[in-house]
Image (cartoon, rainbow, N blue to C red):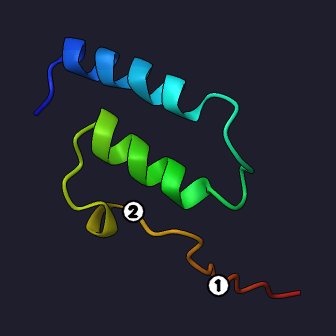
Amino acid sequence: MKTEKQISLAAADFAERWQGKGDEKSESQMFWTDLLQNVFGVEDVTAFIRYEERVKVDICF
């Protein structure tokens, strides 16, 4: 578990790394993976988050 100070320093590095970078849509998965791993210390990002998972909506009229 990262300390608040470690998270703060990692967040500053993350913000600098991503400043003015790329297209939001095409790089969104890399952005979230980087944020979760390098700022918050999530070890297994693929078990933690699902990207663009389809949602089934059952609408009755």
* Mark 2 lies on residue: 49
**Marked residue nearer the N-terminal end (2 or 1):** 2
Residue 7 image point, x, y percent: 27, 22
Give the foreground label among 2 and 1.
2
Query: In this rendering, would 17 be left or right of 8?
Result: right
At a point 52% along the width and 68% down the height, the residue shown is 51
| Mark identifier at residue 56 | 1
Residue 37 x/y as whole percent: 30, 46
Residue under the image location 32 percent in, 68 percent down: 46
**Is 60 rendered above or below residue 47?**
below
Secondary structure, mark 1, is loop
Q: Quadrant of the N terminus?
A: top left
Q: With 55 as the anchor, is 4 left or right in this view?
A: left
Could you tell me residue 4's position as x and y percent?
22, 15
Amino acid on which the number 2 mark rests in the picture: Ile
Q: Is residue 38 left or right of residue 17?
A: left
